[in-house]
Amino acid sequence: MTSMEKGPGRRSLLNWLLGLWGGGVLGSVAYPVARYLAPPDIPEAATLSVGAGSARALAPNSGRVVPFGSRPAIVVRTPAGELRAFSATCTHLDCTVQYRPDLQRIWCACHNGQYDLNGRNVAGPPPRPLDSYDVNLNGDEIVIVRRS
Amino acid sequence: MGARARAWLEERVPLADVVDALRHKRVPHHRYSVWYYFGGMTLFLFGIQVGTGALLLLYYRPSATEAYESVQFIVTRVPFGWLVRSIHAWSSNLMVGCAVAHLFSVLFLHAYRRPRELTWVTGLILLLLTLAFGFTGYLLPWNQISFFATRVGTDIAASVPGVGHGLVRFLRGGNDVTGATLTRLFGFHVAILPAIATALVGLHLLLVQRHGMSVPPSVERDAAGSPGTVRSIPFLPHFILRDLFAWTATLAALAALSTFYPQELGIKADPFAPAPAGIRPEWYFLWAFEALKHVPATIAGINGEFVAVAVMGTGAAAALALPFLVPQTPTGHRVLVWLGVAALAFMGGMTALALTGGAP
């Protein structure tokens, strides 16, 4: 067997090794970088209930946005005087909703989504109702509680 | 500079052949030549962004507790700070405008044709990068409008099937828009995107230099009928001087806009405040923002958001592959022009609707 006949076999082996080397280097860089880019999960104590301010100060046909853990919640006093609480995060694209007395609805300013006083999505692009919370009173203080 | 000094320099930095090549380079000159200048203007504005961005970095602090205050400090206390910030913000707007004008002029003049397919592809990626610069930079002042724009913009990624949730976490640096998002988008804005953009601008310019300017098919046809070929002018100095004139006009417009209409800072972001009424993104995202308002929650049983994202994704992919998809025939060209006009009309119409039709 001459060296000419041996050549291509040896060359393809070398190319293969070279590819393995390059791929190994690229992979060993790309893998940690990709993992680094995905933020670590930071477990957060689940908020079960929060105080949401004075009940007397919340007039009929108005609403108030309060922190509920790391996310906002909205407490609404209906025109009939009833207190209700929902997640304030719009189910469309994550904006924070507010109460619109003129519409008597919960309204999202971002894309004009609307929810009725039961948190149901009734107009605009929101695909789902708002999550609703229980409302308790501790003296004058409104306490909103996540439903189990 | 004396001849000896020039010779000394040439021996150490040999560039004579490059300058000589540029001296002999010629640029086609015809009735559509004016559209050639938008690419150069976009490049000029990119330079302005690098310069003013570097200046802003000297005072800006990328954290949720300090970002707003540091921008406030820049615009109220730092001499000419208001001007530097205003130029950076206005220049980004003009840059998007020039890049879009450049894209559509290349489209309508059919400059994407063989062998310039990759010039088109790199150019379109650069436009997408410019939009990414705009999106990441928008949050940095940490004001109410930018906070919600970022919540909405990043949440759109959630509708991508399978990887949506991971994508949102990648963009936000967590589940919500927080200080972690600010730090992350800041890193994209000042390090990662500029590195990619600089490399691509280099490649794009190299391709433009190697291929020369494209001559529109209609001009080529006219020239074929007449005895003379397409007229041309020398690159150095005729074309460069025209380019410099366009850059000076751009600078004048930029200075006037920044001085007479300085960018507002707005109020500081509050994650527990409702989204303010009248909220809207930058003008170049308005068409998508308005279109999203009109997408129903579900379309034929499929999530409406997903349909919208799929349509936009398909549009972007088709635009990237455009030089390979369009048949190089007069009919193919005509169809493309009408598609381009339809896209412009859709975006223009949606933008007009967003500007005129307020929320109830």
Image (cartoon, coloured by chain):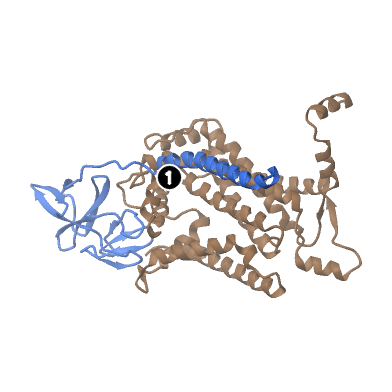
Chain colours: A blue, B brown
Q: Which residue position is annotated with label 1? A: B266
B63 in relation to B354, above or below? above
**With B251 as the anchor, is A118 left or right in this view?**
left
A59 in relation to B78, above or below? below
> Along the line of sight, which residue is nearer the eye, B137 or B198?
B198
**With B268 as the anchor, is B44 left or right in this view?**
right
Q: Quadrant of the N terminus of chain B?
A: top right
- Mark 1 is on which residue type? Gly
- Residue B142 visible (yes or no): no
Q: Quadrant of the C terminus of chain B?
A: bottom left
Question: Badge 1, how many Cα within 10 Å: few under 14, some, many 20+?
Answer: some
Q: Position of residue B324 (x, y in %)?
A: 64, 64
- Name of the residue lying farthest toward the left: A139
Q: Residue at x 41, y 68 (%)?
A: B294
Callout 1: SS: loop
- Total label count? 1
Q: Position of residue B343 (x, y in %)?
A: 57, 67
- Residue B56 visible (yes or no): yes
Residue B222 lies in quadrant: bottom right
Q: Where is residue A46 in the image (x, y as percent from the top left)?
A: 20, 45
> Along the line of sight, which residue is nearer the eye, B193 or B47?
B193
- Name of the residue lying farthest toward the right: B227
> Along the line of sight, which residue is nearer the eye, B354 or B191?
B191
- Name of the residue lying farthest toward the front: A1
Q: Position of residue B320 (x, y in %)?
A: 58, 60
Chain letter behind tag 1: B
**With B170 as the anchor, is B350 left or right in this view?**
right
> Along the line of sight, which residue is nearer the eye, A39 or A89?
A39
